[in-house]
Image (cartoon, rainbow, N blue to C red):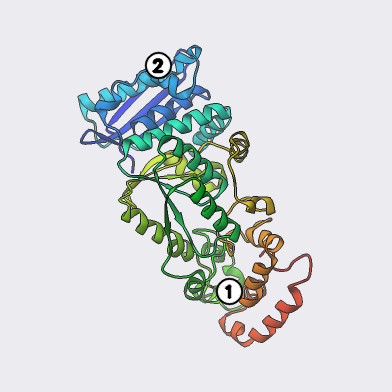
Amino acid sequence: MFNPNGIGKAFGTCGEFLQVSLMVNDDEITEARFCTNARNNIILCGEIVTILAKGSTISKVKGLTADKILEIGGLSDTERYYAELAEKALGKAIESYINSNLKGNSELSISYKERKEHLNFLQSLPLKQKIRLTNFVIKEALDKHERPVIAWSGGKDSTVLLFLSLRQKPDIDVVWINTGVEYPECVKFIRKISSEWKLNFHEAKPEMTFWQVVEKYGYPFFGKGNSRGYWFNRVNLWKRKGRSELARVIEVTKASTECCRVLKERPASRMYQKLNADCILLGNIVSESHQRFLIWAKKGGYFYSSSEKRWKVWPLSIWTEGDVWKYHELYNIPYCSIYDKGHRRNGCWPCLMDIKFPDNHLQSLRRSHPKLWRFLIRDKGLGEVILALKQGLDAKELKEKRDRLKAQVEELIEKRPCYFDKL
């Protein structure tokens, strides 16, 4: 819950307003948010003052001026009006905290629709202005925290973040989570760049293999948080068949996203703890998923994770995919060849989290790496699992019909359109 104890609201001449709310603990600003009814550069100025405030202290941000906001935002003097409104709102929030030390205020009232409009405006900014803002965010993270770390996946987004961050701190710690099922091209790319760029490189590995995770917990179907939810939409079908126990469905399919925790989150956490990391810079782009937008809409691209007890920073949060590729082109930044083979994102090659959508990972894998795809479908039994899902088998039927399912996989594996492309 966001309970601000410093609130400032500044009004413009045409009915627009900017409200800045601060949550302060012993002079440290642990959270800062803004809301506005404007659809112009007031949004950008609101982003700037809240980023400056987060993780800083009241004494440090008291002297923030409109000139500084203009400089950070790459705004001209004709847009001083917006910066002055932001300076005034922040000043009133600080004054509110110092004079009254208000407590128990309600959470900042701003809808996801309004934040979506904020995002649309910020995404529409010229790339030059986004680069300027990104460099500012990186500098804030480097200045405010003792041991910032870059989480680098080898993907196009995090490679741009790495390139920009190295310009400010060449010896910054760079962490790669090697899940053991990264695309071969990505592994080769990471090894090459870490050597050529002389990175302060750290490789984290999980304690279990992907196949051990699948055996114990099941395949990563349907996306984070959706594996079990998918089946609630099919409960009526199972009731009509006299099989209403959802647990039995999960047992048959072993639908699970535990692999993310075991292969990524836990080894990352161990490495960050080993490095005493207090801030993680990630190449997350908000437009890539609804879940990322929900986080950004609530917390922004610079926030403290109470569960992990460290700060997380998304310097590229408002960039688009087009921005990333344009930056690669402008500065001749290398990228992994996986993108030239039809993949829009890198990651774990056996991932099935988007299997219910067109052009999913599994389809791309079949086209780009047919040997790996056949290994997954035939040798690792995924084809039988997909058949069982489509045919509505229970655990007993699956066991009894295993030989028949294997034979069906052999019959279907080379047919096109491919039976295994989508559920």
In this rendered view, identify the residue nearer to me: 186 or 305.
Answer: 186
288 to 134, vertically: above or below: below
Q: Label 2's element?
A: helix
Give the position of the N terminus as an image quadrant. Answer: top left
Viewer-side residue, 79 vs 160:
160
Q: Badge 1 is on which residue?
A: 239
* Residue assigned mark 2: 67
Picture quarter containing residue 367? bottom right
At x 42%, y 24%, the residue is 18
Disc 1 on helix, strand or loop? Answer: helix
Q: Position of residue 379 (x, y in %)?
A: 63, 77
Q: Quadrant location of the C terminus?
A: bottom right
Horizontal side, residue 381 vs residue 206: left or right: right
The residue closer to the viewer here, 247 or 222, is 222
Q: Which mark is residue 270?
A: none
Q: At 26% from the left edge and 37% from the top edge, which residue is drawn?
A: 104
Callout 1 amino acid:
Lys
Task: Identify the amino acid type marked 2.
Answer: Asp
Sequence-wise, the earlier of marks 2 and 1 is: 2
